[in-house]
Amino acid sequence: MLTTLTVARTEARRIFVSPLAWAVLAVVQAILGIVFLQLLLEYAQNPRGQDQYTGIADYVGSGLYGFATIVLLLIMPILTMRLFAEERKTGSLTLLLSSPVSLIQIVMGKFLGLSVFFFATIILLAAMPLVLMAGTDLDVGRIAAGLFGLTLLMMALGAAGLFVSTLTKEPTIAAVGSFGLLLVFWMMQIMGTQHGVLGDIFGYLALVSHFENLRHGVFSSADVIYYLLFTGLFLWLAVLRLDSERS
């Protein structure tokens, strides 16, 4: 466990020492800040006219987090592309694989280091709707459910991107591959609208469909299990990929 935390601390330091992480955080906050203000102004102009929502937490909170999923789809490949690809390109991955550290510890350490960025993003996303507590009767439970869903979604996106990063030595190729893989799972929601067994399968495999309930404050253990299985699967695939390289 201590070794895993050491790898995680090293990875988190490497992420935040780079200006890339700060630039991504700034861009995400700027984009979502504009969306938040737009949603707030729309609600303030016609608070009774939003038939599909029951309150400001639904309209502003769930609307903001719904848009955040699109932003995360775009930025996650950029964040994960360097995890293993850059180390393979510089040759440091060979030293890492030859060390007495287990592959599970390496992968989990890298993933936990990346998770530090996830939590920084969640804190920034939580700050915007929570400022409304000063003047409104905000449903904090709905906001918390949306944040929890975003955390699970980021874990899934990060695990998939980490796996793709183990497949190549070029970070740019890893970013493009990660985006393509995530987009496939994203578009399964469209294919899930078809009738029949295939529609049900694609609907279940779609990344975003499991976030919708949490975004609207509905907690379902099936959605949580899906994201945990998705994350665990790609972390396991990353371990297998590194194991084949070490062998």
Image (tube, rainbow, N blue to C red):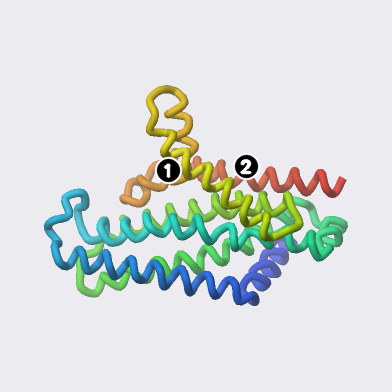
Quadrant hosting residue 209: top left
- Name the residue located 41 percent from the left edge and 38 percent from the top edge: 190
For the view shown, which residue lies furthest in the top direction? Answer: 196
The quarter in which the N terminus is drawn is bottom right
Marks 1 and 2 in Cβ contact (< 8 Å): no
Mark 2 sits on what residue? 233
| Residue 24 horizontal side relative to residue 190, left or right | right
The location of residue 51, given as percent across then percent down, is: 16, 50
| Residue 20 horizontal side relative to residue 33, left or right | right
Please tell me whether residue 16 is drawn above or below residue 149 in the rendered image.
below
The location of residue 27, given as percent across then percent down, is: 47, 71
Please tell me whether residue 168 is drawn above or below residue 190 in the rendered image.
below
- Name the residue located 66 percent from the left edge and 73 percent from the top edge: 13
Label 1: few (<14), some (14–19) or many (≥20) C-alpha neighbours in 10 Å? many
- Name the residue located 41 percent from the left edge and 73 percent from the top edge: 30
Whole-Å distance between the Cαs marked 1 and 2? 17 Å
Mark 1 sits on what residue? 210
The location of residue 173, given as percent across then percent down, is: 68, 55
The quarter in which the C terminus is drawn is top right
Instruction: State the SS at label 1.
Output: helix
| Residue 60 horizontal side relative to residue 188, left or right | left
- Name the residue located 47 percent from the left edge and 42 percent from the top edge: 187
Q: Amino acid at mark 2?
A: Leu
Depth order, front residue of 1/91: 91
On residue 68, which mark appears? Answer: none
The location of residue 10, given as percent across then percent down, is: 70, 69
Depth order, front residue of 80/152: 80
Chain-order first, disc 1 or disc 2: 1
Q: Amino acid at mark 1?
A: His
